[in-house]
Amino acid sequence: MDQRLITQIVESLRKGELIIFPTDTVYAVGCDVTNKKALAALAKWKGVKVQKANFSIICSDISQLSEYVKQVDRGIFRLLKQSLPGPFTFILQATNEVSKLFDSSKKEIGIRIPDNKITLAIVEVLGNPMATTSLHDEEDEIADYFVDPSVIYERFDDEFAFIIDGGLGHLEASTIVDCTSGTAEIVRQGIGHIDL
């Protein structure tokens, strides 16, 4: 993707705007996690209060996690290193930084490092994670307009600063792995496969 375009996208994220972007699973909606106005807008779009929102954060690499998640033991760290970037959401114990960002006493946070060059490039230039939620709701059947960028564009164009075309998305979401107890447990089997 054109570096100038990435710069424009990052500028709009810093201003508090929302974007739709590709991941290695379904298309997602995201914002700059450090921008309170943007988090409020993302929560409003999802129809929830920021304090109640279960957003994940997308990091550019594992080293970016340390500010947002508490120290993990060696086994979990090894699992993260083997699985990421990839189609997984790891639920880890959150640091106070996360509580501050979300104005809540959040004890855990979902972490994603998707295997998608465009998205990782955006987060890298942004310099901090994006808060993210998938374009569809859990209850929705994942239909064309969650997968096909041209249909996503038709449906959501007036609501978002950027809709990034990363080609056809997947119909299956990420695999959610809860590591908050110190052992890994799959809570939703998605596109990613892992041997625990």
Image: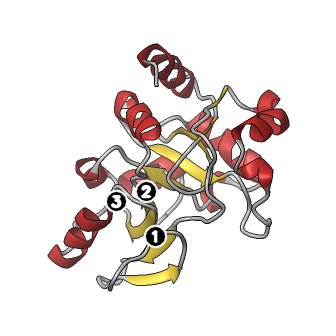
Q: Are marks 1 and 2 in contact (CB under 8 Å)?
A: no
Residue under circle 3?
95
Question: Mark 1 belongs to which amino acid?
Answer: Gly
Q: Are marks 3 and 2 in contact (CB under 8 Å)?
A: no
Location of residue 45 with respect to 77 vertically, above or below: above
Q: Position of residue 58 (x, y in %)?
A: 44, 49
Q: Could you tell which of marks 3 and 2 lies nearer the N-terminus?
A: 3
Q: Of discs 1 and 2, which sits in the foreground?
A: 1
Q: Is residue 72 visible?
A: no
Query: Of helix, strand and loop, which one carries label 2?
Result: strand
Query: Dot 3, crowdedness within 10 Å: few (<14), some or many (≥20)?
Result: many
Q: Of discs 3 and 2, which sits in the foreground?
A: 2
Residue under circle 1?
192
Location of residue 83 with respect to 156 vertically, above or below: below
Query: Of helix, strand and loop, which one carries label 1?
Result: loop
Question: Mark 2 belongs to which amino acid?
Answer: Arg
Q: Are marks 3 and 1 in contact (CB under 8 Å)?
A: no
Image quadrant in which the C terminus is located: bottom left
Residue lying at 56% horizontally and 44% vertically, measured from the top left: 22
Q: Position of residue 173 (x, y in %)?
A: 59, 65
Q: Is residue 185 visible?
A: yes
The structure's colour scheme is secondary structure
Query: Of helix, strand and loop, which one carries label 3?
Result: loop
Foreground residue among 98 and 3: 3
Q: CA distance from mark 1 to mark 2?
A: 12 Å
